[in-house]
Image (tube, helix red, strand yellow):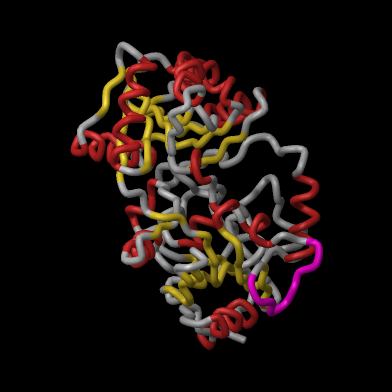
Amino acid sequence: MSTASVNTSPTSLVELRDAVRDTPGPVVATGAGTAADWGAPVVGDATPVSVAGLSGVIAHNPGDMTVSVGAGTPLSELQDTLAGSGQRVALDAARVRRGATVGGLLATADAGPLALGFGSLRDLVIGVTVVLADGTVARSGGHVIKNVAGYDLTKLLHGAYGTFGVIAEVVLRLHPLPPATRTVAYRVADPADLPGAGRAVTDTPVEAAALEWVDGRLLALLEGTEAGVEGRAGRLVDLLGTGAEVLSPADADAAWDAHRAAVDRRPDDRAVVRVGVAPTRLGDLLTGLVADAGADDVTAAPATGVATLTVPAEAALVDAVHARVAGVGGTSTLRARPAGAAVPAWGPAPSSAALLRAVATAFDPDQRLGRGRLAPWLPVPEGASA
């Protein structure tokens, strides 16, 4: 069957199933395109199948605080809809402002500052419908179309970059919108001091929903009632002492906007790398990367050990960054690269790589879906067209 006879812009689950099943050769799922250059590039002449047409709320149960949506739904639009019920998806990834979709955020395991208080989509997704490489429609959670025995589809799809299946629908756990927020800013000039500064906040009874370092300041987001956040913010300033202040609403908005812009930075001449390590190792790692790898534009979450930074877009240097992160037990992922730059997307293969390949073989032995996105962890099958 020729590609011309296949609808590669489906608007329903059935059309998506048919597109995956009937398209000859490799396929790559697309959406808003906000992470098209994340990870490794697609290998070969893959046919794009867009899920952008699978957009909108399928079912919203305010009482149970759940919502089911098409994978092509921009999260920003979903948040606007849910706000009418005083609810939200507690996810604030930086690229949401550029139209990132629910399915794309799940596929790339993206998250934001609120991951400290609410977790990532691994924690917020309670059901998923996916089209497998052979056109099988499988559902995990909710009412069952087809069980995939032995696999938790949600966790398999989280961060798989579309290699195990094309996400069609997602069921999300919701949280209430906070009545009020406050942001406490605390001066921390040296990234080496981040672990201690992070503990200075998290060891207090003042629970922060988010804790992020940007532009030499540690930002602590507090959520709750108006009286509650006012009192907690003042208490945190007292506990932190010199260098701490409660930001005005306008200054707080500007500070978090600056954080989102820094995380979502896409420079023309540098590579963007996302790293994750044990929080106790974060300060030394960042200090070393700044000194030895020319890391810049650093943002970091000292309580979760996640940081985003830019480095010169040189293959050997990016590879050295990956190796250094792996050397302290961490993980790293390429988040953006200049056009045409051939830099490694992933670090040394983890011990779980053999399991990854076994699961990929079970789901998609010919690697039709997203071929190359996880290479070299998931090598292109021998004999498969590149």
Residue 313 appears in the figure: no
Left or right placement of residue 194 versus residue 24 in this view: left
Q: Where's residue 91, x and y in %? A: 45, 51
Which corner quadrant of the image does residue 207 belong to?
A: top left
Q: How many marks?
A: 0
Residue 289, horizontal then vertical, whole percent: 50, 20
Q: Is residue 13 visible?
A: yes
Q: Relative to 251, say whether 375 is above or below.
A: below
Q: Nearer the viewer, residue 305 or 329?
A: 305
Q: Nearer the viewer, residue 194 or 203?
A: 203
Q: Residue at x 68, y 71 (%)?
A: 133
Q: Nearer the viewer, residue 384 or 171?
A: 171
Q: Quadrant of the C terminus?
A: bottom right
- The answer to if 27 sits in the magenta stretch is no
Image quadrant of residue 222?
Answer: top left
- Where does the magenta region start and end? 142-150
Q: Look at the image and say whether residue 145 sits in the magenta stretch.
A: yes
